[in-house]
Image (cartoon, rainbow, N blue to C red):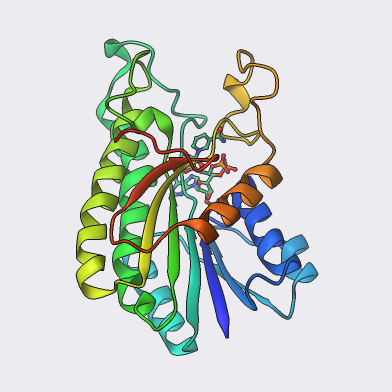
Amino acid sequence: MTAAIVIGANSSIAQSVIERLLSDRKVEHVTAISRNTNPDLQSKFASSLRWICCDYSEVAIKQVCISLHAQEKNFSHVFICNGLLHSAQVAPEKRLEDINTEKLQTIFHANTIVPMLWLANLAPLLKSEIDCSVAVFSARVGSIEDNCSGGWYAYRASKSALNMLIKTASIEFWRRAPNVKLIAFHPGTTDTQLSKPFQTNVPKGKLFTPKFVASSLLEIMESLDRDGGAEFIDWQGEPIPW
Ligand SMILES: NC(=O)c1ccc[n+]([C@@H]2O[C@H](COP(=O)([O-])OP(=O)(O)OC[C@H]3O[C@@H](n4cnc5c(N)ncnc54)[C@H](OP(=O)(O)O)[C@@H]3O)[C@@H](O)[C@H]2O)c1
């Protein structure tokens, strides 16, 4: 039975990914993991969706991965969607004076540490006879080479650090589980809670729906070769400089 894991499952894009995977029968079963439940999706796909609530502590992540191991499924798709740009306490920095310890720690924890703890703990589950694509949600602003506009220190740097961790992990995966392909994915500016305060200057036609992004990502995952390298790519499948 082919199966998928979607982490950060209450992200708007993640919800569209789950809908797409199960409506199109791309996989037979999805395990969704989030801090909160989602009664609508859970009742819509009651027979094919297992929903796990997790506070993303290291202990809880390990426990979830142990329970996934017991399911004995072959995972063909993994999506790690966690990301934080702003909250009631945190706004992206416009200038150096806006930087502080708490902000850096909060953003790095959500964007870098939590996704990497998942990837590390999932590693033993993903080695199998079938190909497995792992999309970790990054952002173009995490590209060091592409950084022309500055600002958003914590968010940018947390995604750059995430990219480095993905690239480094891909070298180990190639040795330990060559069936796994790692993708650092930039969805483009997508109409979600995360981008809401920053949508004013988005050019016409460049604010994507979560549905569009989910479909694009699934097509890209089908098309990529398992060549042992990690890819940093956007919603069109175009490479982004690391
Ligand atoms: N929207 C855009 O324009 C855009 C552009 C570039 C990159 N991205 C990236 O795309 C991904 C999905 O974002 P989205 O646009 O769908 O945003 P969203 O709807 O706001 O989803 C936020 C995601 O982050 C998780 N999350 C929130 N706070 C967290 C915390 N403190 N610790 C750990 N996880 C936390 C949520 O998990 P729960 O399920 O547990 O709530 C959810 O998966 C993110 O990685 C984001 O950086 C988005």
Residue 174 location, x and y as percent? 24, 67
Q: Is residue 197 left or right of residue 185?
A: right
Question: Where is 72 relative to 84, above or below?
Answer: below
Q: Would you say residue 57 is visible in this rendering?
A: no
- Horizontally, is 214 left or right of 230 in the view? right
Q: Up-down: is 111 above or below 152?
A: below
- The spot of residue 81 in percent (x, y) is 49, 51
Q: Residue at x 36, y 37 (%)?
A: 107
Q: Residue 101 at what x, y percent from top left?
A: 25, 30
- At x 64%, y 14%, the residue is 200
Answer above or below: position of 70 versus 168.
Answer: below
Front position in the image: 84 or 48:
48
- Rendered-image quadrant of the C terminus: top left
Asked if residue 120 lies left or right of residue 42, the reply is left
Q: Nearer the viewer, residue 43 or 28?
A: 28
Residue 164 lies, in percent from the top left, at 24, 44
Q: How many marks?
A: 0
Determine which quarter of the picture holds residue 203.
Answer: top right
Q: Between residue 188 and residue 50, name the one nearer to us.
A: 188
In the image, what residue occupies the spot 34% across and 23% down?
A: 146
Image quadrant where one finds the N terminus = bottom right
Q: Note whether 69 is above or below 25 in the view shown.
A: below
Q: Could one spot residue 205 in this view of the protein?
A: yes
- Residue ID at (29%, 52%): 166
